[in-house]
Image: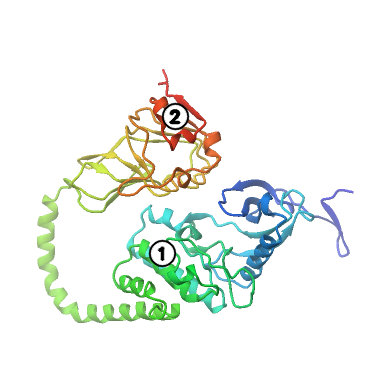
């Protein structure tokens, strides 16, 4: 009998699978995951899911199995539009196409991480709306008695459709109901100081991490005070997110009444301002922007941090996913030309269609996570390179493992005019395939 057909007592024979909608998992593809967990994207019933299980070396470890179960139980308590939804637990015995003994079935979030979204760059009004959604979501989570313990931009997704918040990865989450896995946890840059030694989760730990995240969003106004109080010592910190919301709303009310009081004066100045403004903008020409100046050209966002120098310190890829990408050596905008100087934080991160990248700059630096999640990358071409690119840039350094995935060293070929220099460099020599760049005819 066909395995895709079952018998119904009501209407006889009913198919399990309809055309294009299958009950089994199909189109499975591995997603990058630096931790003990294994992530697989899969299609079922016409919808994308993420299957989270254990990597082979942890699959038989009782502690990691319990940790996975704990994550499932906590996420099943949560039902909020700002939190990635969990549908349940799957098993290899029921789903033989999935090569994991047990796995959590989760919503696939079609979006980008918060830091990738911030690089696009969004308006301050949109950033503030997203910040309010994030605060509301964290507050809901705390009211359910759950502390995330690893709030950071990488665990906050922004959806492509609607620009909404989705918090992901509850692998380190905790609440008072559990007596296991009470060890300190978190990510160094965003973890609260007391959390480094604490054995018991506290919602105020998340509030500190929330403050660090809000600081990266450059929100201005009342949010500067909010961030400062989020990062205060634990007893002086906001004790709940409700108090954060209260401060933001008070500031909004004050601004409203100030605008109402200033309206008569403002009306009397409008005519003069229009006259002066028209005269000014008729003469205004962009010569050289100063300060944090951001603009987009083609598939890239360029940031010039100091207009006194003819260079662009940071570049981010924001185009559609393509197999091949070329980054020019310089960019012209208005009457100015700047040299591309640096691949910014997470420049090509999670560009899982990228196979070949050509970097035309003679020299540049590379920040963290620039090629993390580029699972199909095969070739990096640097035809004009004069010296091996420094790992890190500006006033700081990092390590090459923070930029590339371990499998890149075996799979990716570097094409450069200075082969021996690259092979002798202590960082770049980790690539097994370094070849001379040959100009195509």
28 horizontally vs 304: left or right? right
Residue position marked by numbered label 2 in the rendering: 423
Residue at 49 percent of width and 44 percent of height: 351
Name the residue nearer the viewer: 346 or 201. Answer: 201
Name the residue nearer the viewer: 297 or 433. Answer: 433
Q: Quadrant of residue 417?
A: top left
- Between discs 2 and 1, the one toward the N terminus: 1
Residue position marked by numbered label 1 in the rendering: 213
Residue at 30 percent of width and 67 percent of height: 220
Is residue 420 placed above or below 61 in the rendered structure? above
36 horizontally vs 222: left or right? right
Please state the horizontal and vertical placement of residue 233, each as a whole percent of the image. 38, 76
> In the rendered view, how is the structure colored?
rainbow
Please state the horizontal and vertical placement of residue 210, each as a whole percent of the image. 43, 68
Name the residue nearer the viewer: 236 or 214. Answer: 236
Separation of residues labelled 2 and 1 (CA atoms): 39 Å
| Mark 2 or 1: the one toward you | 2
Name the residue nearer the viewer: 21 or 64. Answer: 64
- Helix, strand or loop at label 2? It is helix
Is residue 206 placed above or below 160 in the rendered structure? below
């Amino acid at each position: 009998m066909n395995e895709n057909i079952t018998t119904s007592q009501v209407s006889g024979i009913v198919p399990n699978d309809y055309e294009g909608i299958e009950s089994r998992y199909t189109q499975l593809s591995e997603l990058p995951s630096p931790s003990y967990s294994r992530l697989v994207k899969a299609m079922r019933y016409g919808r994308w899911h993420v299957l989270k299980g254990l990597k082979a070396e942890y699959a038989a470890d009782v502690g990691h199995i319990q940790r996975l179960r704990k994550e499932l139980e906590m996420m099943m308590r949560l039902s909020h539009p700002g939190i990635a939804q969990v549908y349940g637990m799957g098993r290899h015995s029921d789903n033989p196409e999935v090569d994991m003994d047990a796995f959590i079935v989760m919503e696939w979030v079609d979006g980008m991480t918060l830091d990738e979204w911030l690089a696009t760059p969004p308006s301050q009004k949109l950033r503030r709306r997203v910040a309010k959604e994030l605060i509301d979501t964290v507050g809901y989570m705390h009211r359910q008695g759950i502390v995330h313990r690893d709030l950071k931009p990488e665990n906050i997704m922004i959806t492509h459709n609607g620009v909404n918040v989705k918090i992901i990865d509850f692998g380190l989450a905790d609440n008072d109901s559990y007596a296991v896995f009470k060890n300190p946890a978190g990510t160094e840059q965003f973890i609260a100081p007391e959390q480094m030694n604490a054995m018991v989760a506290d919602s105020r730990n998340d509030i500190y991490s929330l403050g660090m995240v809000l600081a990266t969003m450059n929100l201005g106004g009342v949010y500067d005070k909010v961030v400062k109080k989020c990062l205060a010592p634990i007893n002086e910190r906001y004790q709940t997110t409700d108090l954060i919301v209260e401060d933001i709303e008070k500031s909004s009310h004050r601004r409203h009444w100030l605008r109402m009081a200033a309206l008569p004066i403002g009306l009397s100045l409008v005519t003069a301002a229009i006259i002066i403004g028209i005269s000014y903008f008729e003469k205004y020409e962009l010569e050289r922007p100063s300060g944090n100046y951001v603009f987009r050209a083609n598939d890239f966002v360029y940031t010039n941090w100091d207009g006194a120098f003819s260079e662009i310190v940071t570049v981010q890829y924001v185009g559609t996913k393509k197999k091949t990408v070329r980054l020019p050596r310089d960019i012209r905008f208005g009457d100015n030309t700047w040299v591309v100087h640096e691949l910014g934080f997470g420049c090509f991160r999670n560009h899982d269609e990228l196979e070949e990248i050509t970097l035309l700059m003679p020299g540049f630096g590379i920040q963290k996570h620039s090629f993390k999640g580029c699972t199909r990358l095969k070739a990096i071409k640097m035809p004009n390179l004069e010296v091996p690119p420094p790992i890190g840039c500006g006033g700081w350094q990092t390590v090459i493992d923070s930029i590339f995935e371990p499998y890149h060293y075996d799979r990716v070929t570097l094409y450069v005019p200075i082969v021996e220099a690259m092979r002798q460099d202590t960082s770049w020599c980790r690539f097994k395939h370094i070849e001379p760049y040959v100009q195509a005819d």
